[in-house]
Amino acid sequence: MNNLEVRNTNKKRIVNFLYANTKATKQDIAKSLNLSTPTVSLILKKLFAQGLVKKSGVLQSSGGRKPTAISLVYNAKLSAGIEITQNHLRFVIIDLSGHVLHYKKIREPFQNDNKYFGKVADSLELFFEENSIDPASILGVGIALPGVVDVKNGMLEYSPTLGVKNLPLEVLTSYFPYATMANNEANLAGFAEIWTIDSIDNAIFLSVNKGVGGAIIIGNKLYNGCNGRAGEFGHMTIVKDGLTCSCGKKGCFEAYCSTKVLTEPNFNDIDDFFGAISTGDKYCIEKWKTYLGYLSTGINNIHTIFDSDIIIGGEISQYIQQSSEFLNRNLSYANSFDRQYDYIRFSKYGDKASTVGAALLFVDSFLNE
């Protein structure tokens, strides 16, 4: 890394340290992070100027002058995130620590027209008003989208879930009076997960919603691939000449493990399906067991290739967690090398992960500027 990258990394480390420790002295920070006191002083000076840290009294001393305590100002700036799905919109507002201050989900079926795009922007403004958010405090609005996103050229190249190709993001972002950034929903969910982990070498994030996608994390960074399509696990084949997927191919992982497999044709929402299971609906119980069987096949394939932890997120994660014993038995049976399944983890943010990851784009940019 060059000097600027090192300084930015150290700034984030200091912010994360102050997040984990309500109050700390300059000396505490230097010692705990193995940094020199002048380096810490220089970074803190910049953080004070940005309004990100404050003096918060003094701490006890064994003798001599009492050291000054320093704390983060979490709400100095806020960031907003939006996730666009086939039938819903999710909104979050987070502070600089990544803490979710406000969350909202509304039913709004996607339409590729100006009326819909304007409705997204209007719904965000209403969200701000409902929570008494000063627009001036907003760093920007991150947008999570299902599909292949060309970040450099601002294009949603392909989204089987939304049924669009080569959609310029400007048709949506032009409605916002804020800075905007957008990316693939699964990549952003993975970004949200690694944000909360101080150090992780390798992991796979598997996002299961109406679309199935993922993110590959190598050396605590997202790996995007040569064309920005890395982690599109939903379109690997798990059944030769199987069911037709939304992408038009047959036998894709998504064709067997999208949440639509569970909800269609009898339910409007995933919660309704599991509500039926809770009442003892035998058809739904058997359907869920079959679903978990296919999910196990996909997860085992991913683990065989990457040999790393797999973090499961998306709408389905909370329900998989409740059925983890059945899933683990399937994974143990499928594993060619041993009977372990302890590589499975679950998303910290659940179905909010993509929306939080979108909002974190601006927090990350702000902390590293």
Image: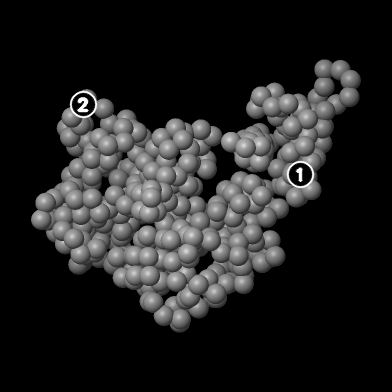
Q: Residue at x 20, y 67 (%)?
A: 265
Q: Are there few (<14), some (14-19), or many (20+) residues within 10 Å of tag 1? A: few
Amino acid tagged 2: Phe
Q: Nearer the viewer, residue 204 or 208?
A: 204
Amino acid tagged 1: Lys
* Residue that badge 1 annotates: 46
Q: CA distance from mark 2 to mark 1?
A: 51 Å
**Any part of residue 274 in sight:** no
Q: Is residue 61 above or below residue 322?
A: above
Q: For residue 58, what is the image quadrant?
A: top right
Q: Which element carries disc 1, helix, strand or loop? A: helix
Residue 249 placement (x, y as % from top left): 18, 60
Number of labelled discs? 2
Q: Which element carries disc 2, helix, strand or loop? A: loop
Q: Is residue 77 above or below residue 323?
A: below
Give the numbered dot on residue 337: 2
Residue 54 placement (x, y as % from top left): 78, 43
Residue 217 placement (x, y as % from top left): 42, 41
Q: Nearer the viewer, residue 249 or 113?
A: 249
Q: Residue at x 55, y 52 (%)?
A: 360
Q: Residue at x 77, y 37 (%)?
A: 42
Residue 252 placement (x, y as % from top left): 20, 54
